[in-house]
């Protein structure tokens, strides 16, 4: 996904990678990365969990809006 993200960025399209496994996603240096403590396969949140899904999307948009340099990361506490 990071390679796709970098390709989008080169075309002028901002992107955010959402990952639940930072050791796998970070080495490829995505332009922006949101690390969530969620289950594999439910990266945005479990089915039917609209609150978690909205929170993930809110944080993705915030990262797009506030990241001032490539490599920005937002992690769950």
Image (tube, rainbow, N blue to C red):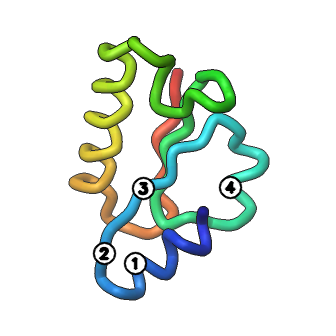
Disc 3 and disc 1: Cα gap in Å?
10 Å
Side (left or right) of 22 relative to 10: right
Give neighbour class at mark 2: few <14, some 14-19, many 20+ (Cα, 10 Å). Answer: few
Q: Secondary structure at mark 3?
A: loop
Give neighbour class at mark 3: few <14, some 14-19, many 20+ (Cα, 10 Å). Answer: many
Q: Nearer the viewer, mark 1 or mark 4?
A: 1
The image quadrant that residue 28 belongs to is bottom right
Disc 1 and disc 4: Cα gap in Å?
17 Å
Residue at the (59%, 42%) spot, across then down = 19
Q: Which residue is mark 1?
A: 9
Side (left or right) of 13 relative to 47: left
Disc 3 and disc 2: Cα gap in Å?
10 Å
The image quadrant that residue 62 belongs to is top left
Task: Decide which of tag 4 and tag 2 comes sooner along the chain.
Answer: 2
Determine whether label 1 and label 4 are within 8 Å by CB: no
Give neighbour class at mark 4: few <14, some 14-19, many 20+ (Cα, 10 Å). Answer: some
Side (left or right) of 70 relative to 27: left
Task: Decide which of tag 3 and tag 4 comes sooner along the chain.
Answer: 3
Q: Which residue is mark 4?
A: 26
Residue 6: image x %, image y %?
Answer: 51, 76
Q: Secondary structure at mark 1?
A: helix
Residue at the (69%, 43%) spot, across then down = 22
Q: Quadrant of the N terminus?
A: bottom right
Q: Which residue is mark 2?
A: 13
- In the picture, the disc for residue 74 is none
Determine whether label 3 and label 4 are within 8 Å by CB: no
Side (left or right) of 33 relative to 56: right
Residue at the (30%, 82%) spot, across then down = 12
Task: Decide which of tag 3 and tag 1 comes sooner along the chain.
Answer: 1
| Figure check: 53 above or below 67 | above
| Figure check: 24 above or below 69 | above
- In the picture, the disc for residue 16 is 3
């Amino acid at each position: 996904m990071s390679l796709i993200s970098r390709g989008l960025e080169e075309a002028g399209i901002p992107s955010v990678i959402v990952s639940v496994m930072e050791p796998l996603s970070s080495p490829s240096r995505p332009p922006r990365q949101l690390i969530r403590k969620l289950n594999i396969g439910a990266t945005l949140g479990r089915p039917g969990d609209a609150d978690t899904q909205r929170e993930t999307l809110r944080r993705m948009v915030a990262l797009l809006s506030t990241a001032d340099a490539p490599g920005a990361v937002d992690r769950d506490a």
